[in-house]
Every structure is written in C-alpha cells, then in structure tokens.
Amino acid sequence: MVSKERSTGDETREADGGFSCCAIYPTVHARGQDQSHGLIARFRANRGAFPPVSLDWIPRLTYKGARAPPGVRGYARCEANSRGHTNSVRRGIQPNRSGAARWTGPFLALMALALGACGGPFPQSALDPASDFAWRLQDLFEWIFFWAVVVFVLVQGALIVAILRFRERPGGPSPKVTHGNTLLEISWTLAPAIVLVLIAIPTIKTIWIIDSPPRGESLVVEAIGHQWWWEFRYPDLGVVTANEMRIPVGKQIDVRLTSADVVHSFWFPRLGGKRDVIPGHETQIWFTVDSAGLYLGQCAEFCGLSHALMKMELVAEEPAEFEAWVSGQRAEAAIADSAVAADGALAFMQGGCIACHTVRGTVAQGVIGPDLTHVGSRRRIAAGILDNTADNLERLIRNPQEVKPGALMVVPELDDETVRRIVAYMRNLK
C-alpha cells in the first residue's frame, strides 16, 4: 500500500519513500490549463491491475526492493501539482543509468593507467633488450605471453558464451542435468598439458643455452661486489676500475662474478638476467652487446643499509674507442698539473687515504676501497649515485655517511683548504 503524503512548499513528497510493488503512477499533463489551478490526473493500479496506458514516455527508474511487471520499463511516480511543477520524482526512487554510462568511469580510469604505462624513458627495462642474452629471454617471454593470451581468450570466451546463451530466462525451462561428458573432460585435461609442454620445451632450451659456458673467444671481466660498490678487473688487459664497466660492441663478454663480503646480485636489465654474487664462489654470465650506448645496472639482492645506492654503469663503444680507453687506463696516474693539485697529492698520501685506495705510480696501494688511478675520467662517483664534479667529490670526502649511510669509508678531520686541495688532485687523475 502507499504511505501517506504531505505537501512541502512547491513539491510533493512521500512520507516514508515506500509504496506497493505493483503501484504505477503515470502523470497526465493537462497542457493549456491555468497554472494557478493545475490539474493532477492519476491512474492508480493496485494488486497487479494495470491500466491500459502506454508507459514508453516514463523514464527508466527503479525502486529498491521492487520488481517491475513484465513489459514495464520501471517504476515512476510523477505529478503535476497545483503550482505547475511537473515530474516530481518520489524519494526512494533512483534513476537506473544505462550500461554505457555505468562503465564510463572505470573505463576511463583503466585507459589513464594504460596510457601512463606508455611513458618513458625506462633505461632499466628488461623489455628493451640490447644483447644476445637478453634477446633469448625476450623471445621466451613473448612465446609464453602468446600462449597466456590464447588461454585467456579461450577461457573467457567460453565463459561469456555460457553466460549469454545459457542464462536463466523468465518462463524458460529448467536446464538439463548433465552428470558427465567424457569428451569434455578429456579435452580440458589434455589442453593444459599441451600448453605446458609448448612452454616447457623452449624454456628448458633457453636455460640450457644461457647456463652453458661461452663458446669462442671472449673478453674476460672479473666483477667483484663490495659493500656498496663494484670493482671491475680486466685480467687480460691489466686494467682495474670501479663502478664503470667498458666493453667493445660486438665482442663476447665473459663476466666472472664473486663477492668480497656478503651476497650481492649482478644485474644489467637490458643486457641479461640476474646473477648471484657469492663470497668464495664464482658465478658467470656472458653476453654480446649489439649497439653502443650507456646501460645502467644495480645490485638486485639486499646487501645492507646502502643496498639501493649500489649502482653501476656499462659503456659499450666501438672497438677503436675501447682500445683508446684501455691505453689510457693502463697508464700510471697523471702528475699534478697545478700547485693546488700537488699540495692535494701530498695531503692524500699523508692523510691516511693510501690505506684503502690505490693510485698506480704512487705509494698508495690500498685494496679495501676503489682504485682511484683514473677517477677523474669517470662519469660518476660513489657507485653511480653522484655526478663526478668538484662539489660532489668535496661532499663525499667531508661526510661519506651522508652520501652513503653505512659506508666503510673513514675520513680524518680535514680543514676546508685541505679538502679543496685533495679534490683538485683527484680531479687531475685522468
């Protein structure tokens, strides 16, 4: 039954927002009538009795807890009151938005996320391979992704067909009870097995290739992980450097990995997969870079307080440029070219720096910290987190713990002038 009504100013409201589930109130507008006297024409249908009035004009409205009779688009209660206000929708009745409008918001949000993922640049993306090793991983990934899409389309397609074709319909017969289907059961057992075989064979083949020793002539590079920096040695070339690895394009590189303290993980995303770096144990990764450029890497295994600051760079260059770099790295440390740099060299040798660092051609032969023989020619310092500038060198020398928390670098008390001279000397080491 319909609850009592009360008039409040210019609109008529329902007392409690409820009405019988078979009550439909179409309003007939008496056009041309005097607005001051208005006309309300009501056709009331109760107990399932429905007047022969076309309701196509009524907006699609739904009422919570009520179901429209067959053929009726929705429930509405509209009036033209004595003050000329029409189509006053009662409380408790809400418009039922169309499917397109309902999904517009989520669709736009999903598109915004998808377009945001298309930005860049992504210098450490494993989906942008630049070596033979990385291309093998990419090919395997694309093969697995293809079969994942096939499975998704088939499963979701079957689900959608089942929902649309076999859904319950008013007045429809009960579905036929099926206790088993031998062909269907065999099919959904064999199909996943076939997909797994199609994925397993190329996966095992790829693992076999990348874990086998490199074939042919290779340039050997020894990579040693420290807390929290990388040491690179070229035993066949007599070159030692830190945090910056240089290689020639088109040459197979055999990287042999070990650690001086804790477990690290060697990872250049665009060049190959991760390799654990373990104290007292040598692991290996090999690859051939196909294009010149700068490639960023990092430690991928938590190794202490400054793990996130343990970065590295790989510079791939043409063979002629690489040979020139090797010739420069083989040379001993440059002689100070100014009085300030000469004073800095003296302060460096007398200030305790030689206990940890090597500068070839001098008395500094420490092996705990990075080799600084040609530190002035490196792009970055502090394991790739700072540009190699005078200001950043001064900042690192003054307070290494601020730059890299937990760093083992210990610096004695130095006055401003001494720090400035040491920086001048280090900038001279090219």
Image (spheres, rainbow, N blue to C red):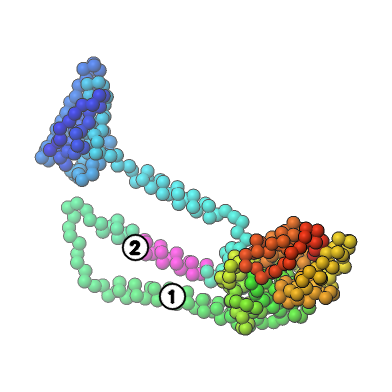
| Residue 313 sits in quarter | bottom right
Q: Position of residue 109 (x, y in %)?
A: 45, 49
Q: Give the total number of marks visible in the rendering.
A: 2
Q: Residue at x 36, y 45 (%)?
A: 102
Residue 391, above or below 318 = above
Left or right of 236 in this view: 272 = left
Quarter holding the C terminus is bottom right
Residue 94 picture quarter: top left
Q: Note whether 90 is above or below 406 in the view shown.
A: above
Identity of the residue drawn at 72% across and 81% down:
217
Mark 1 vs 2, N-terminal side? 2
Q: In terms of image quadrants, where is residue 23?
A: top left
Q: Nearer the viewer, residue 343 or 129?
A: 343
In the rendered structure, find residue 196 and report the number of the disc placed on it.
1
Secondary structure state at the residue bearing disc 2: helix
Magenta highlight on residue 151:
yes
Residue 361 locus on image (x, y percent): 84, 75
Q: Check disc 1 and report its element: helix, strand or loop.
A: helix
Disc 1 vs disc 2: Cβ atoms closer than 8 Å?
no
Q: Main secondary structure of the magenta part?
A: helix
Residue 274 shown left or right of residue 60 in the figure: right
Picture layout, residue 171 above or below residue 48 = below
Q: Does the image show residue 430?
A: no
Give me the residue at 34% from left, 72% from top: 188
- Amino acid type of the residue tagged 1 in the rendering: Leu
Q: Mark 2 is on which residue type?
A: Ala
The x and y percentages for residue 404 are 64, 64
State the residue in front, 337 or 364: 364
Q: CA distance from mark 1 to mark 2?
A: 20 Å
Q: Which residue is mark 2?
A: 158
Residue 34 is covered by the magenta coloring: no
Q: Which residues are magenta?
A: 142-157
